Image (cartoon, rainbow, N blue to C red):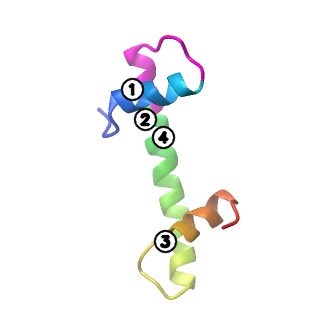
Amino acid sequence: MTELPKATMGKLLKEAGATRVSDDAKIELAKVLEEIGEEVGRQSIPFAKHAGRKTIKARDIKLVIGKDE
């Protein structure tokens, strides 16, 4: 089971334009988002370390995903 709530996944998919969303789709989206989140977290650690920090900040995540501040 995932940690992200199914209701939130349903809301995201509906905001994306879906009319109806199955529970399986909600669970699968949660799994995918958790995997992506973990990978972004792993990739942001070197940015924080390079800046002399142990704390990951929003700017580290933005650097990983290629989004300017």
Horizontal and vertical percent for residue 30?
42, 34
Q: Is residue 57 left or right of residue 24?
A: right
The amino acid type of the residue labelled 3 equals Lys
SS for dot 2 = helix
Residues under numbered marks 4 and 3 in contact, where contact means CB atoms less than 8 Å apart: no
Residues under numbered marks 3 and 1 in contact, where contact means CB atoms less than 8 Å apart: no
- The stretch in magenta equals 17-29
Quadrant (top left/top right/bottom left/bottom right) for the C terminus? bottom right
Q: Which residue is mark 4?
A: 33
Residue at x 46%, y 84% (from the top left corner): 53
SS for dot 3 = loop
Q: Earlier in the sequence, mark 1 or mark 4?
A: 1
Residue 28 magenta-highlighted: yes
Residue at x 39%, y 26% (from the top left corner): 27
Q: Earlier in the sequence, mark 2 or mark 3?
A: 2
Which mark, residue 27?
1
Residues under numbered marks 4 and 2 in contact, where contact means CB atoms less than 8 Å apart: yes
Q: Which residue is mark 3?
A: 57
Task: Count neighbours of disc 1 (C-alpha within 10 A) and say few if under 14, some if 14 to 19, many if 20 or more.
Answer: many
